Image (cartoon, rainbow, N blue to C red):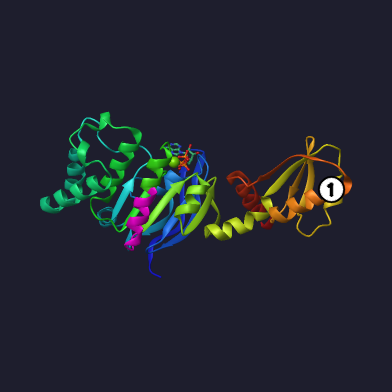
Amino acid sequence: MENAIIVKNLTKHYEDVTAVDHISFEVGKGEIFGFLGPNGAGKTTTIRILTGLIRPDEGEAFVAGFNVLKSPLEVKQRIGVVPEVSNAYIDLTAWENLVLIGRLYGIPAQRLWENATKLLKEFGLYEVKDKPVRAFSKGMKQKLLLCMALVNDPEVLFLDEPTSGLDVESARLLREKVNQYNRDGKTVFLSTHNMEEANMLCHRIAIINHGRIAAIDTPENLRIQSMELQYIEVAFNKPVKPQEFLENPNIVNAVPAGNKLRVYTPNPPVVIELLVDYAKRRHIQILSLNTMMPSLEDVFLKLVKGREAKQ
Ligand SMILES: Nc1ncnc2c1ncn2[C@@H]1O[C@H](COP(=O)(O)OP(=O)(O)OP(=O)(O)O)[C@@H](O)[C@H]1O
Ligand SMILES: [Mg+2]
């Protein structure tokens, strides 16, 4: 598969912080690639390097076939960006913003008019195209930013936490549009701290933490890797010994958690039955029972710890 993005050993320091720490990865043409990480992980810094806004201290990157450092204009012509902080002028109307960005790209007037009209209609903004952006809600603004990123028919689309702060419906519309754009064979690089979003949208995900990539895989494989981090928290009306559960092959670990028992398992339904049977046999009662999915933090901890152990 041809690659839309190639990153080799990219590194960026800010004074005493290493924002991006020798990362390497490739994104195939037509892929939706997720960059998943907590605050300060280095997501925005990576996107800013790949879109030519800042220079790395080390390493190199290619986007849409061009070297980001040596041919920044060729790269800019072929990408669209929805930045973390809005790049729309709030005193201009939606239409004026699109015209402005279209002119920056050098899009011929007729095509610009067509693209802007089509995008505004698709995103439900056509009716408000002559209103100043300062009157837009957060969701409307974010839709406009996506229109602005798409107005030059980019080959690669960069999105920095595009649905952050949006309501469920606006977030879904944005994801739908990203999917639609991708169906035409275009590449998407998306940063998020939302595991569910990465799950829904991305073909592959890189988990980034402290400027380093802890794992790159499909959402399914990442989930499987973390399955044993699921646990069931159960409260009985009498004390039980965690050791009693450790021999079952479906149980990875069992530890006390306050007055509850926490049972780690890749297979919650089987273990729930087992706990119910156990309670019946012992003539005790289950007061509460919850299945807990691994949080993003759990997955991180596991991946980061796993890596440190190997080093
Ligand atoms: N211009 C800057 N000057 C100094 N430090 C910076 C600058 N930009 C980023 N950093 C630092 O680099 C690290 C990575 O920041 P970055 O913005 O890339 O993270 P992020 O993953 O996008 O986080 P968030 O989810 O909060 O947007 C952080 O420790 C941040 O404080
Ligand atoms: Mg960021």
Q: Which residues make up the magenta segment?
A: 175-186
In the rendered view, does 273 fall on the left or right side of 91? right
Mark 1: few, some, or many residues within 10 Å (few <14, many ≥20)? few
Which residue is rendered at x = 52% and y = 60% of the image?
218
Residue 217 in the magenta stretch? The answer is no
Quadrant hosting ligand 2: top left
Which residue is rendered at x = 40% and y = 41% of the image?
169
Frontmost residue, 191 versus 126? 126
Which x, y percent locates residue 177?
34, 51
Name the chief secondary structure element in magenta: helix
Q: How many marks?
A: 1
Classify 46 as above or below 139: below
Q: Is residue 48 visible?
A: no
Q: Quadrant of the C terminus?
A: bottom right
Frontmost residue, 17 versus 96? 96
In the rendered view, does 10 fall on the left or right side of 63? right
Frontmost residue, 100 versus 62? 100
In the rendered view, does 135 fall on the left or right side of 164? left
Which x, y percent locates residue 300?
60, 48
In the rendered view, does 179 fall on the left or right side of 38? left
Q: Which residue is mark 1?
A: 280
Q: Quadrant of the N terminus?
A: bottom left
Residue 181 in the magenta stretch? The answer is yes
Q: Say what secondary structure mark 1 lies in.
A: helix
Classify 252 as above or below 53: below
When asked about the image quadrant of residue 139, the answer is top left
Which x, y percent locates residue 265?
72, 53
Q: Is residue 218 visible?
A: yes
Which x, y percent locates residue 213?
53, 53
When asked about the image quadrant of residue 32, the answer is bottom left
